[in-house]
Amino acid sequence: MPGMGGLDLLPVVKELWPDLPVFMISAYGDARTVETALSRGANRFLTKPVDIAQLKRDVIAAIAEAGGGG
C-alpha cells in the first residue's frame, strides 16, 4: 500500500468509524505484529494464507457482535 501501511491506517479508520469491525490480514503473524494490530483496534488478525472457512466464521461472529445478522 503506497504511503501508509495497514498498521498505520488502522487507527485512522477506527477514529473515523469506531464501530466498524476491522480484520487485519498479513503474511507477518509474529506476536509483535498481532499485538500492535489488536492494540490499534483490529478486531481480528489473520495470517496468510487465509483459512477461508475460519474467515467466514470470523465475519459471521463480527456481524453478530455488532448487532447485525439480519
Image: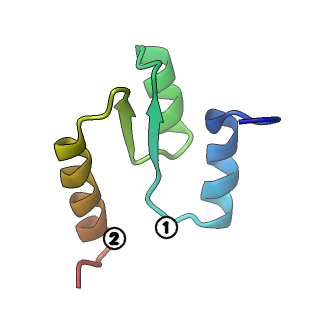
Residue 27 image-quadrant placement: top left
Q: Which mark is residue 63?
A: none
Which of 70 and 16 lies nearest the eye of the viewer? 70
- Mark 2 residue element: loop
Q: Are marks 1 and 2 in contact (CB under 8 Å)?
A: yes
- 10 Å crowding of disc 2: few (<14), some (14-19), many (20+): few
Which structural element holds mark 1? Answer: loop
The residue that mark 2 highlights is 66
Q: What amino acid type should be assigned to the residue bearing mark 1? A: Asp
* Number of on-image labels: 2
Amino acid identity at mark 2: Ala
Nearest the eye: 13 or 51: 51
Is 1 positioned to the left or the right of 21 in the image?
A: right
Q: Which of the labelled discs sits on residue 19, or is there none? A: 1
Q: Residue at x 27, y 66 (%)?
A: 65
Q: Residue 35 versus residue 24: which sits nearer the camera? A: 24
Query: Around disc 1, counting alpha carbons within 10 Å, would you say few (fewer than 14), some (14 to 19), or many (20 or more)?
Result: few
Where does the image place residue 13, in percent across and percent down from the top left? 64, 56
- Image quadrant where one finds the N terminus: top right
The C terminus sits in image quarter: bottom left
Q: In the drawing, does residue 26 fall left or right of residue 51?
A: right
Taking the spot 69% from the left edge, 33% from the top edge, the residue there is: 5
Q: Residue at x 50, y 21 (%)?
A: 33
Q: Position of residue 63 (x, y in %)?
A: 29, 68
